[in-house]
Image (tube, rainbow, N blue to C red):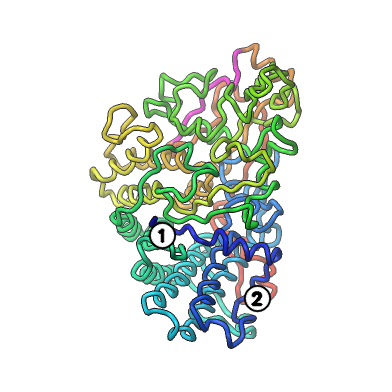
Amino acid sequence: MKFRKLYTLITGVVGLVLISCHDLDLQPLSQASGETWFTDETQVEMSLNTLYLHQFWPMFKCDWGTTAIMSLDEASDDWMNRTTLVPFTNGTLNGDNSTFVKNTWSYSYKAISRANTILENIHRSKENIKDEYYERYMADARFVRACMYSRLISRFGDVIYYEVNMDLEDAYHVKRTDKMEILQHIYNDFDYAAEKLPVEYTGAETKRATKGAAYAMKARIALFFKDYETARDAALQCINLGVYELYPDFGELFRSKTKNSIETVFGIPRDHQFGSAIPPNGVRPYLSRNVTSPSTTAQPSWDLFCSFLCTDGKTIDESPLYNPNEPFLNRDPRCNYTIVEFNSNYFGYNYTPHPDSTTCWNYELNRQVPNKDSKAGDQYASYNGLMLRKGIDEDWNDDFYVNNDKLIMRYADVLLIYAEAKIELNDIDQSVLDVMNKVRARAYKTDYTSSTYPRITETGQAGLRRILRIERRMEFAFEALRYDDIIRWRIAETVMNRSNYGLPTSVADCRKLVTDGLWFFGGTPEIDGNGCPDFSRMANISRYRVLSQRVFDPAKHYLWPIPASEILINPDLGNNPNY
């Protein structure tokens, strides 16, 4: 069997590292390796494998250990956690109150230091490695270094840049480098990686980064910095490799049983046996009260729910197919793949948050049981009535350890990066419509040339931009991509200053809504030019509860603060504006 993506043998190798080093000492390898390391291929391989630890690729709550810190989705308008906000969403973010900020900085630089150490020392093993593999190993390290710097400059702007590990004394005084200069170094590393890395791996080889992953990750960072020509070209190079396809079943793609799919351009596996599974602290928040407790602290927002199109391809405020009393009916299939539909089977329970539903059907027991997913049965039931379905399947509630692949880059993203770059260049041709329609048609389980789904035919730049932004939100919900999208599009100052709405506090008030025919919520919000709902002007919105008020200051929050601990060590770093 051939492998066309980063999907490593690292399942075992990294797992062993995780087991043996529960609290990893992630200082640069050069500080502990000594003169005998990097003398043969095995040692180089082992060093490269450690670059793909989950700690270096944070996306979800427990990627830095068993403590649930934060998912990047929590910083976006897709997420709802009862009445609670995080520093990213309540306007209090600073360099000292976010572990996510501190760890993003420190773990990125630990990975960079490891990559640099490999590049500085790999010459020791040159006589013991074939030339082809020698260059491949260097490309692998440069790929990771480029990914880490991509993350740093997209989050912090200007950061410290180095390709050779510094002496401790120098580190106390180093200054930040302009992010656009660093971007050129990132491009150089990705270009080298794309040239030297293989398109595919054979079954006997260690499977790490690939040529396609290098093209795709280059396209992603180029798009973020509005270098649309580079993004277009790199995405097209990935597409033209001809080794990736859209997985035929959107709902199945994200489940733990789907491994190493044809759509994964860059992913890292998990395995409970080797200590890399998502632990219970990162699992229970997504599950309902009928399944486990504590739970229901990680739900899709009403904003996300209302952003899914109807099956005629129109937004809910424009489509005659939308019925607010049956809000899951006639929606894009990705809506029901992402969010649990009312009165559907959810872990053996009929999921209904309806306030009159004191009991619900248990499919396994074949009888009614107390319903903890309704406010009538549990005050901590989902505060807005919604639960996440995407990626969640039967093995999530056996021992609450789960092994879903971490999908860092998938082919659908490559296609939509290509489309977005072309749209922003106003270079709209049939290829743009084709790639967007391929992504949409897959959700309907049909071919993109068919007439059985709402094909995209818009060719105007403004109209197609709006469609693209909606498409990305429907396609990538809860994949840690929405935050970067709203930052890149400069719409965070709009969407992140809106309220999070949910159901009234009391069961009695919820039942009044039912009596007045307002269940689930009795109205249709206006969908703005970016495809985002604005509930503030929705009829009857005053009958519902403001769960929280997001706060985003455009004068500073488009960048993260430099961690205070780093500035304390090196005052020359300074901080980003207005922190």
Q: Is residue 385 left or right of residue 186?
A: right
Quadrant position of residue 548: top right
Residue at 57%, 47% (x, y): give it: 73
Q: Nearer the viewer, residue 408 or 473?
A: 408
Residue at 60%, 73% (x, y): give it: 573
Q: Amino acid at mark 1?
A: Ala
Find out whether residue 328 is within the magenta segment: no
Q: Amino acid at mark 2?
A: Pro
Residue 334 spot, x, y in % from top left: 46, 34
Q: Is residue 400 visible?
A: yes
Q: Which residue is mark 1?
A: 213
Q: Which residue is mark 2?
A: 571
Mark 1 or mark 2: whose residue is earlier in sequence: 1
Instruction: Bin the neighbour count of mark 1 within 10 Å (Cα to Cα): few under 14, some 14-19, many 20 and up.
Output: many
Residue 399 spot, x, y in % from top left: 69, 43
Quadrant position of residue 182: bottom left
**The magenta segment:** 517-528
Q: Nearer the viewer, residue 464 or 135?
A: 135
Residue 106 spot, x, y in % from top left: 62, 67
The image shows residue 326, relative to residue 53, as above or below, that is above
Q: Is residue 569 left or right of residue 431?
A: right
> Which of the image's four quarters has the C terminus?
bottom right
Mark 2 element type: helix
The image shows residue 116, relative to residue 356, as above or below, that is below
Residue at 61%, 31% (x, y): give it: 386
Instruction: Bin the neighbour count of mark 2 within 10 Å (Cα to Cα): few under 14, some 14-19, many 20 and up.
Output: some
Q: Is residue 225 visible?
A: no
Mark 1 vs mark 2, foreground winner is: 1
**Count of numbered circles in the view:** 2
Specify the principal SS of the magenta part: loop
Find out whether residue 522 is within the magenta segment: yes
